[in-house]
Amino acid sequence: MNVQQLINQDEVQPSRFFAVKVECFSKLIESIKKKLWKDSQYRIILQDFGKGQSVQDYSLNSPSQSPLFKDWVVVPNDPTIQLIILQKCHYYPLACNLGQEKTLKLVKRDFHWSGMNQFIKDYVSSLQQCSRNKNIHHEKFGLLKPLPIPNGPWICISKYFITQLPLSNYFD
């Protein structure tokens, strides 16, 4: 079989990857549903669903009956569940060990909880392996060229104004 035949074969189907993803998270979804009843913020929403009332931006996933916030699975304010989700996404087998931005995007595809952005950034920045493997985004430092020592006081005064620097991660 040559390369062209492999390309035309179309063996890789998205549904296969979706099946792997569902299998990994099915037990997690069950524990999320149990913990949501203990979370005061989401207990009210679940009680409203039980009465047949609708809640703005929230819906129920029909097969699993888990609450969704704008098509994302709602995660309670439980750090252990959030950490499990984060570890499954950060060490995702098909994507390897992701950085902050890619891990955030991967988690945001399926899950939602308050303070998620900061939680993920804190987690990834605390990992030694991630900080060691992080690419260096600057040029090598040049040689140190100190200023000459002046002959007397107030002979040499210098002032530097650094302006119009590029944004770094959308911040000044």
Image: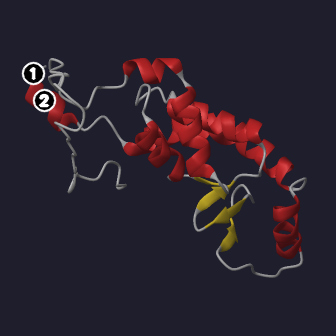
The circle drawn on residue 110 is none
Going 47% across and 40% down the picture, which residue do you hit?
103
Does the rendering let one see residue 144? Answer: yes
Q: Nearer the viewer, residue 17 or 96?
A: 96
- In the picture of the structure, the residue carrying the numbered disc 2 is 5
Q: Nearer the viewer, residue 142 or 73?
A: 142
For the image, the number of numbered tags is: 2
What amino acid type should be assigned to the residue bearing mark 1?
Asn
Q: What x and y, as percent, mark residue 122?
A: 58, 37
Residue 5 occupies quadrant: top left
Q: How is the image coloured?
A: secondary structure
Please rate how many residues cluster around mark 1, counting C-alpha atoms within 10 Å: few if below 14, some from 14 to 19, many from 20. Answer: few
Q: Secondary structure at mark 1?
A: loop
Please rate how many residues cluster around mark 2, counting C-alpha atoms within 10 Å: few if below 14, some from 14 to 19, many from 20. Answer: few
Q: Secondary structure at mark 2?
A: helix
Going 49% across and 30% down the picture, which residue do you hit?
92
Quadrant location of the N terminus in the rendered image: top left
User: How far is mark 2 from mark 1, CA to CA?
Assistant: 5 Å
- In the picture of the structure, the residue carrying the numbered disc 1 is 2
- Left/right of residue 135 with respect to residue 21 in the rendered view: left
What amino acid type should be assigned to the residue bearing mark 2?
Gln
Q: Nearer the viewer, residue 95 or 137?
A: 137
Residue 45 occupies quadrant: bottom right
Q: What x and y, as percent, mark residue 134?
A: 36, 25
Going 53% across and 32% down the picture, which residue do you hit?
124
Vertical position of residue 105 compared to residue 89: above or below? below
Vertical position of residue 44 compared to residue 122: above or below? below
Quadrant location of the C terminus in the rendered image: bottom left
Vertical position of residue 21 compared to residue 62: above or below? above
